[in-house]
Amino acid sequence: MENETTAAHFHKLFDLILKTQVTNREGQLFSLEEGMTKAVQMISSLGPSSNKALLIGNGGSAAVASHMQNDLCKAAGVRAMVFNEPPLLTALTNDHGYESAFERLVELWAEANDLLIAISSSGRSENILRAARAAAKRQCQILTFSGFRSDNPLRSTGDINFYIASESYGAVEVAHTILMHSLTDRVMASMLAGKDTTAS
């Protein structure tokens, strides 16, 4: 990237996002538009019900998870939570190991028909994979965002999986952030449209 212009860099990111691969658990391929529509439906199904979204990620992906949680709660009115509180997370990692920390929190909080949003640039983080398996056992919906290698195991755990074909942390995290912003905006728009229909 040393000799790459800013415009070329942004064009590359834009192209990467448009080429997002979307699959289900069986590996069936969907267009980006189909995948976004299905993901919006999954999030919107939580609506005013007792169900909620649980968002998990490590490092930069944890920041992306917190950002989406904020937007879901504030802008879309969807109940959502993250597991990034340092005292609890460090207590669990100290006593039980980092690999099981999110898994234990999913087992504590997840209920049937909740939605787990699992974010991992590599798609190989053991704590994310174990949490996804725990969510599946509790009959949660699962939405994943990953990157790096196309055969990463997180891609086969979600009902809908968004995959970015890049091994650059920055590119993958930016793409995930943009996809999640778009999802939140569309969920908010669909809920506002529903309110307008009810009002009429």
Image (tube, grey):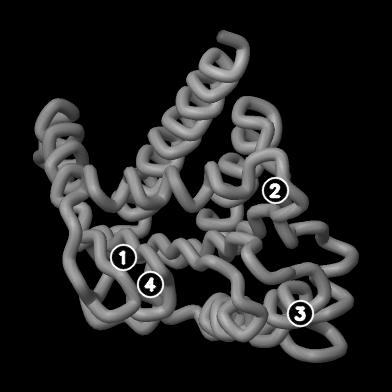
- Label 3 CA crowd tier, 10 Å (few <14, some 14–19, many 20+): some
Residue 108 x %, y %: 82, 75
Circle 2: residue type: Ala
Residue positioned most to the bottom: 96
Residue positioned most to the front: 200
Per the image, the residue denoted by label 3 is 107
Per the image, the residue denoted by label 2 is 80
**What's the residue at 42%, 31% (across, down)?**
186
Q: From the viewer's perspective, is residue 95 above or below residue 135?
A: below
Asked whether the residues under the numbered discs 2 and 1 touch, taking CB atoms below 8 Å apart as contact, a structural biologist would say no
What is the spatial separation of the Cα atoms under label 4 and label 2, in whole angstroms? 24 Å
Q: Nearer the viewer, mark 3 or mark 4?
A: 3
What is the spatial separation of the Cα atoms under label 1 and label 4, in whole angstroms? 5 Å
What is the spatial separation of the Cα atoms under label 1 and label 3, in whole angstroms? 26 Å
Circle 3: residue type: Glu
**What's the residue at 26%, 59% (across, down)?**
164
